[in-house]
């Protein structure tokens, strides 16, 4: 897993590290890392480093100092470097002196546009982790003139470091270099950060346990069940799907198909779309109601069941079955409208809720807001459930506060029925007894890989997403470390 720490934790750790490090050494180490990434970007973009034009957008404080020192290192590789000072009186003195010694050019903001427009690379050193809010007008005016790739230092200026929120003018980076550890912004707003490069400055021993994690391919490969020689259809998990209606029969087909292709040993479908499900997935045992479904080890309930009396009865029956439940779509709406349906749930029985922003607002009385991690944690605590908050970045939180984020691989799968596919994946993992928090996170990961495979840069319907699940699982296994 990749650990992610809040900026308060990062700054406290940096202070402890600075206290035992020679003055200026940490900044020079960080800046050298920036210069290495910058040189690589220049070579990729223009074919060379020597003779290319780099512009530094330099704010006050240490972030600007990192940019200035990085510029000094780039000068030693014969790049042309121009520092545009947004606040000359507060520019980092040592970094400024180093750039000038190396032969770099220093100009004030008024002269910036003519250098920015001819740059081969722009390095964003405007603000650091302490800043909040959008860019100031003078900085925003300069950023709007940028046409070259942008390398951000620590985070794109104007993007909130702890939530990834963008509330006004901000830098959109091609790449972001960060130091010591990843911050929430890097996982929560990849569209503005671009590729994230981590430079080790010796910070990890000072950090402790992370505030948030992101699963990597090895975690998912290790978690996903692989049948062994002693397995049979029962030991690989029996999942029940209570989904679909006369109005939304497709939800049943999608959720059931996802569970079947996710290596569930057996899938039992219960609902009014039984004939359609059998026609599409003949291996599924399909019945007309949850009371006739037979024994299962987990349930998925909600996609397309409706929010009337029949849907409520189905939800209460499933919640009272004494097995883990993934409640999606109409089930979350029913829980929000009629909270007493949760009285049917046996205490301690695992529950995973999978709301999108609108369903979250019904559950919690308000939209998630900018801090989606804390929003998911609050909902998890309120409902004593794992909450998978859907969105561009999926956040998964459990009642004790443990949280993970799944960084997306594009937005093409944001189509009707995509959530039904995800619920089927979650249910298949719950059925094999996987920790519900990990089950939700691993399902979200494979769902995003399937979306990437299915879309190939074009819009993709949810049915294509289902069909891509086997390829997604093969991809996860192939990319995992060999000892997994």
Image (spheres, rainbow, N blue to C red):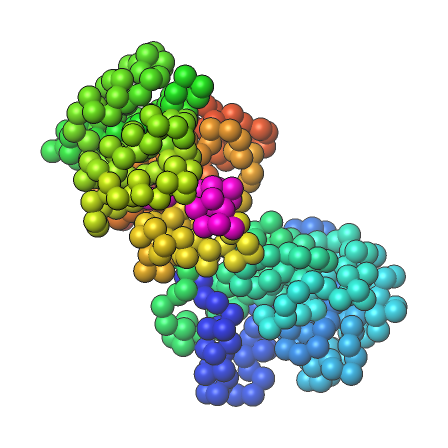
Q: Report the side of 260 relative to 90 (left or right).
A: left
Q: Position of residue 305 (x, y in %)?
A: 38, 26
Identify the residue shown where x is 31% and y is 21%.
271
The x and y percentages for residue 482 are 30, 46
The correct choice, above or below, for 431 with respect to 58 in the image is above
Residue 170 falls in which quadrant of the image? bottom right
* Residue 256 versus residue 481 in the image, above or below: above
Residue 35 as seen in the image, left or right of residue 445: right
Q: Position of residue 210 (x, y in %)?
A: 39, 65
Q: Is residue 37 visible?
A: no
Q: Residue at x 63, y 60 (%)?
A: 159
Residue 477 position by quadrant: top left
* Nearer to us in this view, 14 or 382: 382
* Magenta run includes residue 357: yes
Q: Magenta span covers which residues?
A: 352-366
Of 336 and 271, nearer the camera is: 336
Between 307 and 398, the one lying in front of the other is: 307
At 29% across and 29% down in the image, what residue appears? 314
């Amino acid at each position: 897993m990749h650990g992610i720490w809040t900026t308060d934790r990062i700054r406290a750790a940096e202070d402890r590290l600075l206290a035992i490090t020679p003055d200026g050494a940490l900044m020079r180490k960080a800046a050298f890392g920036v210069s290495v990434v910058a040189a690589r970007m220049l070579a990729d973009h223009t074919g060379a480093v020597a003779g290319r034009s780099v512009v530094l957008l330099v704010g006050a404080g240490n972030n600007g100092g990192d940019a200035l020192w990085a510029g000094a290192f780039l000068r030693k590789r014969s790049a042309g470097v121009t520092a545009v000072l947004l606040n000359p009186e507060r520019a980092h003195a040592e970094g400024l002196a180093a750039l000038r010694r190396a032969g770099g050019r220093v100009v004030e903001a008024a002269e910036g546009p003519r250098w920015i427009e001819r740059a081969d690379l722009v390095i964003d050193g405007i603000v650091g982790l302490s800043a909040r809010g959008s860019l100031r007008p003078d900085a925003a005016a300069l950023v709007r003139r940028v046409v070259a790739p942008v390398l951000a230092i620590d985070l794109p200026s104007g993007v909130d470091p702890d939530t990834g929120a963008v509330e006004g003018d901000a830098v959109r980076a091609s790449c972001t270099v960060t130091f010591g550890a990843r911050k929430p912004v890097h996982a929560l707003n990849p569209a503005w950060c671009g590729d994230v490069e981590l430079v080790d400055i010796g910070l990890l021993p000072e950090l402790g346990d992370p505030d948030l994690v992101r699963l990597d391919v090895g975690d998912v490969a290790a978690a996903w069940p692989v049948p062994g020689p002693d397995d049979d259809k029962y030991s690989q998990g029996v999942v029940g799907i209570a989904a679909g209606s006369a109005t939304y029969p497709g939800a049943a087909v999608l959720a059931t198909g996802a569970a079947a292709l996710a290596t569930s040993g057996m899938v039992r479908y219960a609902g009014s779309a039984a004939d359609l499900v059998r026609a599409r997935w003949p291996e599924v045992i399909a019945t007309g109601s949850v009371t006739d479904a037979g024994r299962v080890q987990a349930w998925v309930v909600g996609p397309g069941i409706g929010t009337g009396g029949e849907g409520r009865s189905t939800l209460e029956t499933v919640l009272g079955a004494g097995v883990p439940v993934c409640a999606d779509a109409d089930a979350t709406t029913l829980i929000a409208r009629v909270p007493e349906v949760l009285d049917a749930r046996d205490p301690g029985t695992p529950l995973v809720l999978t709301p999108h922003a609108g369903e979250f607002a019904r559950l919690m009385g308000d939209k998630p807001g900018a801090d989606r991690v804390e929003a998911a944690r609050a909902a998890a605590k309120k409902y004593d459930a794992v909450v998978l908050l859907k969105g561009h970045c999926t956040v998964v939180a459990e009642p004790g506060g443990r949280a993970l984020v799944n960084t997306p691989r594009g937005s093409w799968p944001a189509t009707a029925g995509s959530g039904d596919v995800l619920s089927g994946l979650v249910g298949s993992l719950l059925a094999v007894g996987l920790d519900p928090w990990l089950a939700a996170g691993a399902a979200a990961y494979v769902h995003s890989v399937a979306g990437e495979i299915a879309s190939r840069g074009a819009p993709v319907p949810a049915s294509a997403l289902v069909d891509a699940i086997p390829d997604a699982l093969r991809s996860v296994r192939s990319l995992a470390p060999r000892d997994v």
